[in-house]
């Protein structure tokens, strides 16, 4: 094996390791949680604990965003970006007003 081939194998190994690392980080970031709160007119969930969660993009999130004033139980993943909690909605259930 030439020096160039060894170098190419090393670079390929590093790239593959990086891909595995990024994939693992994404999977771990998508830990599922459940929040109970009220949908606000700012496309947010105001949790019963007072925490505010931005409703993330997506079909289910768009449906949820239209339920302004409704108390809901939401299951999804939470990410933090620029000091805001963003909730990627996987499912929700209306639990009253």
Image (tube, grey):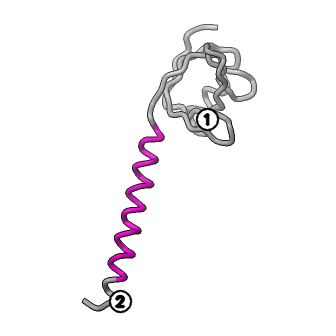
Q: Residue at x 49, y 25 (%)?
A: 75
Which disc is residue 15 wearing? none
Q: Which mark is residue 86?
A: 1
Residue 39 image point, x, y percent: 66, 20
Residue 87 location in percent, x, y? 58, 32
Q: Residue furthest front?
A: 3
Left or right: 82, with 94 as reference point: right
Q: Secondary structure at mark 2?
A: helix
Q: Residue at x 35, y 89 (%)?
A: 4
Q: Quadrant of the N terminus?
A: bottom left
User: Picture coordinates of residue 93 (x, y %)?
Assistant: 52, 18
Q: What residue appears at the point 45 percent right and 54 percent down from the top-left corner?
A: 22
Q: Which residues are magenta?
A: 7-30
Quarter occupied by residue 49: top right
Magenta span contains residue 18: yes
Specify few, some or many for label 1: CA neighbours under 10 Å numbering under 14, 14-19, or 20 or more: many
Q: Main secondary structure of the magenta part?
A: helix
| Label 2 sits on residue | 4
Q: Earlier in the sequence, mark 1 or mark 2?
A: 2
How far across and how far down the image is residue 52, in percent? 67, 25
In this view, 39 is above or below 31: above
**C-alpha distance separating marks 1 and 2:** 46 Å
Residue most extreme to the bottom: 2
Which is more toward the observer, 62 or 54? Answer: 54
Q: Determine whether, in the image, residue 44 is placed left or right of residue 2.
A: right
Closer to us: 95 or 22 = 22
Among all residues in the image, which is located at the extreme top?
97
Above or below 92: residue 31: below
Dot 2, crowdedness within 10 Å: few (<14), some or many (≥20)?
A: few
């Amino acid at each position: 094996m030439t020096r160039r081939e060894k170098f190419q194998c090393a670079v390929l190994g590093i790239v593959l390791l990086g891909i595995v690392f990024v994939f693992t980080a994404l999977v771990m970031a998508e830990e599922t949680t459940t929040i109970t709160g009220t949908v606000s007119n700012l496309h947010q969930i105001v949790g019963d604990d007072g925490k505010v969660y931005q409703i993330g993009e997506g079909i289910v999130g768009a449906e949820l965003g239209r339920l302004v004033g409704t108390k809901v139980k939401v299951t999804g993943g939470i990410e933090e970006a620029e000091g805001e909690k963003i909730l990627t909605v996987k499912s929700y259930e209306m639990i009253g007003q």
